[in-house]
Image (cartoon, coloured by chain):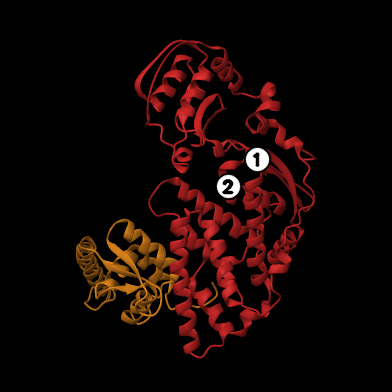
Chain colours: A orange, B red
Amino acid sequence: MQTPSKTSDSTRDWLRGSLDLAVLSALSSGEKYGYQILAELRRATDGRIDLKAGTLYPALHALEAQELVRSRWDDASGRDRKWYSLTAAGRRRLRDRAREWLEFTAAVRRLLESALGGGDAMATPPAKG
Amino acid sequence: MSEQEFENYLGLLGRFLRLDAGQREEIRRELRAHLDEAVEANLAAGMSRDEAVRQALDDFGDAAELADRFGKIGRNERWFMKGTAIAAVVAWLGFMGTQGLTSSEGPQQAGSATVAEVLASPRSATAAPVDKSAAGKASEGEAANRVPPTDNAEVARRLSKGVLTEVNFNDWTIERGIEFIAKSVDVNYHFMREELDAIGADLSQSITCNLRNVQPEAMLKILIAESGPDAGVSYRVENGILLIGSEHGRPRRLETRCYDVSDLLAMRAAVAEQVPGGLGSTDAREEFCRTLRRVVAPESWVGGTSGVEGDLSMFGATVAVYQTADIHVQVEAFLHDLRSVAASTTAPASASAAR
């Protein structure tokens, strides 16, 4: 796809493992339809998570198959839309996975900070002798 | 135009997904709603209608990827097959995913989409590839004496020449009665549940019947008649197995029809030139045959599981398809879809430069 996306390659790699988590998060504030979920992810991440619809919908359907989200059709908004919301299991999964993710990223952060020499680990190699 | 293009896009996507009709309709409806929403947002952002449509389809992502991902939800490997079918077609067309659909006001494709059905002579030039294995099940009568590996003839012989010395069905189900017959003459049997369900056949009805020295086949017919005169239950022998299914599920007569696909081949060649590195060295004609097999009723070709053993081969730019009438209809629909999408996709190369 030649359209430059705001999602960089490395972001995409990280996202791969946390796509479900991102989608569940977007639903945590309430029922949404697909288009809104994409918008919410973009908004909340300053455009860093900019999913394709072609990625989102299959993910939603997979989450629904696992009963982590449920869906219903409704056209009360003036347009026929399929609304998704978290199930209790989805909420639990979000909480658990989010905790794991935060712990993991906190650890990675410490690792990177020391690598970047925020401390003195990467400063100068200790002089010999 | 855009309306038509959405429909083309979704239609082709739906075909590739090979989901059951209900799921397909549901997904289609959902994606449709999304595209509408996206186009509206793009219009609100000040794009022209053309741009808005193209952008929406671009943002939508790769059709192949989409289909592939949908293909991975639960279930079994049938889904995987679906994924590969898409990959094959998309690779063959070489563009769908990367360019999305352009939205030219260009020529309406409807007129050009008619399938050129050159001739329809049963068993003409295509006889060669077809004969080898299609004969057995396709037309029982003529093929019976040259059935290749299976023992259909032997099964038929046991059913017609055998004798059931004693039949005592006291409040048995029809199904149990059929099993009894098959076991008595020692033939493999199988109930085609999908076929039976499709016609709402009920083989659990109770029967009582006491007979002596009956021909197994006659007994089988009696039992099947017990399921109701118009129930549509039927039996057949395939690959040496006695199958209980529906009248409709019977292998029907296969016929050869030829389709001129020179336009699709030419289009593919044109696309290949535009794709950096080309589309690989695969023979486009061979590839086309493979694609057709994978996308249209994959189980209905030689070696498939449906009992229909169709075949196809290419002569120049004409593909000769040996299939049942209803699968011919699917072939036509597939070619039609390809042409519709292709027509709108290949239209103006300048479109992508527009934004």
Q: Earlier in the sequence, mark 2 or mark 1?
A: 2
Q: Residue at x 51, y 52 (%)?
A: B82
**Residue to which mark 2 is pinned:** B297
Q: Is residue A44 above or below residue B84?
A: below
- Is disc 2 surrounded by few (<14), some (14 to 19) or many (20+) residues within 10 Å? some
Q: Is residue B145 above or below residue B202?
A: above
Of B88 and B199, which appears nearest the observer? B199
Percent coordinates x, y for residue B231 in the rendering: 48, 37
> Looking at the image, can residue B276 be seen?
no
Instruction: Tell me the distance, in whole angstroms, between the alpha carbons under discs 2 and 1.
Output: 10 Å
Using the image, tell me which numbered label, if any, was put on residue B310. Answer: 1
Percent coordinates x, y for residue A104 in the rendering: 23, 65
Q: Are marks 2 and 1 in contact (CB under 8 Å)?
A: yes
Percent coordinates x, y for residue B216 in the rendering: 51, 17
**Three-letter amino acid code at disc 2?**
Ala
- Say which element carries label 2: loop
Q: Residue at x 68, y 39 (%)?
A: B254
**Three-letter amino acid code at disc 1?**
Gly
Spot the residue most to the bottom: B46
Which chain is disc 1 placed on? B
* Residues behind callouts 2 and 1 on a single chain: yes
Percent coordinates x, y for residue B144 in the rendering: 67, 23
